[in-house]
Image (cartoon, rainbow, N blue to C red):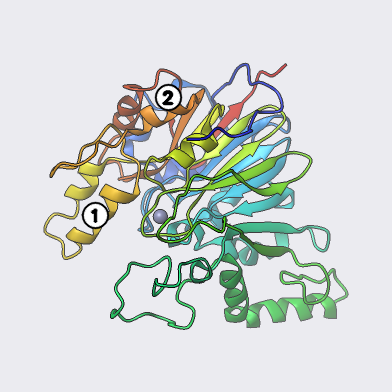
Amino acid sequence: MHTTSHTPRRALLGMSLAATATAGLSCCAAPEQQSKGTAASATPASSGPPPSRGTHLVMLGTQGGPIPGARAATSTALVVDGAIYLIDAGSGLPVRFSESGLDFAQVRAMFITHMHSDHYIDAFNFFSLNWTNWKFPDQQVAVHGPGRADLSGPEHSSSPGLPEKPHAPLVVPDAPTPGIEEFFDLSIRANAYDINERLRSTRRHGDVPMDLTGRTGDALMKAHAIKVPQHANVVEHTPQMQPIAVYEDDRVRVTATLVDHPPVFPAFAFRFDTDDASVVFSGDTTPNDNLSALAHGADVLVNEVMDIEAATARFKGSALYATMANQFATAHTPSRDWTPPGGGARKPGVGRVAHECGAKALVLNHVYPGDGSVPDRDFKRAAERNFSRPVVVSRDLMTISLASLV
Ligand SMILES: [Zn+2]
């Protein structure tokens, strides 16, 4: 275990948690949303985007997994003095962002934790569908995410980032594990008609060209692969490491570490240090030392959560049972301390993870099951067994404000 050099630029002395309920949330909320014990009922509700000053979380999509349901898939906006940083871009981001009232023109960067579809599938759509909302030609949004997994693996692995099963067929065998740069390149190719029509039409009418891709000047969006340490690969997927410097501007410093989400490689957690707070996003991961080190002393830990028993029970009798049970057992963070039924090492629950890294508050996202079959209050109580500070089970379009600074 090593310690990181992270310290918030100023200490966070207090925090207020405010929940925002909007029409978009109300229309699709599961019944337990209004139940006692959720943040929505514990604090006064407000509507609209967060205040222009300070650091705020706007939870855009809060469900674990790619199956559409009551919640949108994972995506969060971190808003720092009005500047917006997106963490993950699961299904529903373009709609939820519009519903939130956040300003597209204030989006500065997007960070993708890993190449599972519930974390990136709307990354390109977010830019494309909202093309009239961007500030052309002045706005540029940096997108940081995983590089091609097959460029980072040991020689003996048939395809780093994929399960080792050499004789199983692959889709696109010459490039089976594209990263975020290839995702954007290929999305541009697939959407060329729409992009070209709008680009030519705006130029023809003498308007500012709508240039998503940089064909005529500066691109609205530009993808960057996060470079992983040389000693990291699909076998050594979470070696002890110093945080990776990913992004910095006048509002935030963003660092990353590799987390444990087998068989996916690479999978990142991100830490944002602002003038008034530090926030860590776990991404998808089982509890591990790299995440603990990155989150050490953070003000807020935004961590995925899974009720493993309930998740596994959903697939009893299914043809996918073995695959899903294994994934739930090995790749995610349990809602409470959990020991595999057949024996094995006990996994700490999410509350213990937050306690051990010294977080001042815990926000649960990527909630699974997120359809209400496990009430939010159960996730909250489970985390509180090992964590005595505020716990919020997030809901789509909930705003969480981190305030009271000196
Ligand atoms: Zn995942």
Q: Which residue is disc 1 drawn over? A: 326
Within-10-Å neighbours for mark 1: few <14, some 14–19, many 20+: few
Element assignment for label 1? helix
Taking the image in four quarters, ligand 1 sits in the one at bottom left
Residue 64 seen by the camera: yes
Going by the numbered disc 2, the residue's amino acid type is His
Side (left or right) of 217 relative to 337: right
Task: Give above or below for 363 relative to 37.
Answer: below
Which of the 4 image quadrants contains residue 388?
Answer: top left
Indicate if the residue with disc 2 has its beta carbon within 8 Å of ligand 1.
no
Residue 50: x, y in percent?
64, 34
Give the residue type at disc 1: Asn
In the image, what residue occupies the spot 43% across and 26% down? Answer: 356
Residue name at image x 42 percent, y 24 percent: 355
Residue 35 in the image: x percent, y percent? Answer: 34, 28
User: What residue is shown with label 2?
Assistant: 355
